[in-house]
Amino acid sequence: MKYFSCTFALIAFVAQIHSATAAEIVVQAGGTGTAQTGSWSSATDATMPYNGNLGVYTQAGNTATYTFAPTFPQTTTYAVEVYNSCYSPRSHIVTHVINHAGGSATHIIEQDCAVDPYRGQWRPLGSYTFNAGNTGGLTIYSAGSNNSYVGATAVRFIYTPSSNPPPTITPSTTSMNVNEGQVVALSATANDVQDGNLTSAIQWQALGQTGTGPTFSVTAGAVNFVVTLSVTDSQGASSTASVTVNVTPNTPPPTQSRFFGFDCENLEALIGFTTNNASALPNVGKRCGRYTAELLNNDNDVTLHYNTSQGRFDGVLATFPFTAIVRNVGVAPLGQPDVAHEVQYAYNFAGIQIHNSDFNNLNSAHVVVGMRSGTTTTIEGKLTRDGVSTPTDIGQNQLPKGRADIRVVGATNGTLTVYWQQPNLTGNSNNDNWIPYNGTGILPGELPVWGRSVYIGLITYAAGTSGVPFMGLADSLEIIGQ
């Protein structure tokens, strides 16, 4: 495979009639509606192109992503199919995430031409609802793949065009600049060919607040945000619009260095922490020199921290740049704080999370210690950008006692570098021996959207009920201003 870049001819949407009613939108690599992170090159040695397009490729296992995101003409159900040109060796496990109106769907795809039954063909991935506009699409992730290369060629979305044109919605502006704490006041109009004026039916949403009608107001926090508008006519056709609000934050004070130790006695309340979703994990506090979180029940995955799921979080506000260190963190059986909790095929974790200063914002990062399915006594790390993440870990049985020290360095530009070590129980930092996470210190995924300040804190959670009950533990959390 040759290594050089190429820009493909513009092929934005190709609308073809499959039957009397069906139409399709095809987005091809290099065309309008595509975006990428990381390094992708043209697949000049591949075969079986789509419409002459051989696609692009990247090295397997890096953090590159390739997104196919068209402008959807109407809110309806679309059948999603992916096309990959033929090449070997390509990965046997490529993560494809479809972001749609109802959330996201993940598919693990075979791409190696030697064994892929869909080589040179469209592969169906199911049907999903997308809202009209630039509201979703499909992203291919190289993270977690294997076997040399990951490819991206084309994606198509098949739908039935509606005979009922959607209403139009027009906000007073599409973007504005404000200061932190300023009231953002907006207005909009909406009209429909059949129903007439629908302005009174406009639905607004921003920063966890909603409204109905021609006007909407919300108070700006410290970070940029988006106001969304939508309106639906009497036949179910809908349209959306958005207003981007760029916020100039008040100059925050520099991060103050703080150390949180945890006293013995009964399970006492944590002091100095801001808590989000306390009801998800009520038995959290301090006991015997440790942060202690007793996870007794995980029905409906109430404690889970994964993409759009947000369990309990206890943290403090800090401003970039900073260093955060959590000591002797991990999970243990209930009542046995010095025993490693080892359960096969469980997702049981405790560790550190960095979260956008708005808890309703789905941008965060975490580094946690515990069990990751069949991988026991490991460290998992990930970045979550707008509710999408692909976690990795450092491998099986890397922590003989099921505990680790974690160090996260937040740079001025918002990037994070992560280190770990076997627990240093002496309390003497001169004895630290930090190891970069997976050799680089870089977590997998796209950099989250941060503001000037973020919350840094502790999480304990499970996915499913395997291994429950258990305790999340940590000896201390230290935040160092730089």
Image (cartoon, helix red, strand yellow):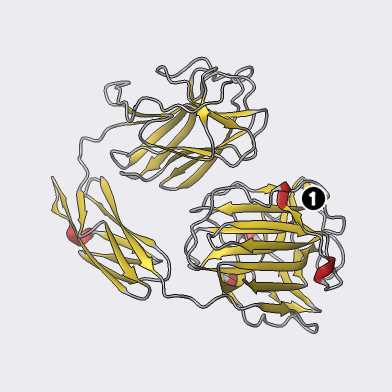
Q: Quadrant of residue 338?
A: bottom right
Q: Residue at x 55, y 67 (%)?
A: 320
Q: Is residue 305 visible?
A: no
Q: Quadrant of residue 351?
A: bottom right
Is 468 drawn above or below residue 71 in the view shown? below
Give the position of the N terminus as an image quadrant.
Answer: top right
The number of numbered discs placed on residues in the rendered structure image is 1
Q: Nearer the viewer, residue 266 or 410?
A: 410
**482 to the left or right of 428:** left
What residue is shown with label 1?
376
Q: Is residue 49 visible?
A: yes
**146 to the left or right of 447:** right
Q: Residue 74: horizontal and vertical position, in percent?
A: 29, 40
Is 370 drawn above or below residue 166 in the view shown? below
Q: Residue at x 53, y 49 (%)?
A: 388
Q: Residue at x 25, y 45 (%)?
A: 237
Q: Amino acid at mark 1?
A: Thr
Q: Secondary structure at mark 1?
A: strand
Give the position of the C terminus as an image quadrant.
Answer: bottom right
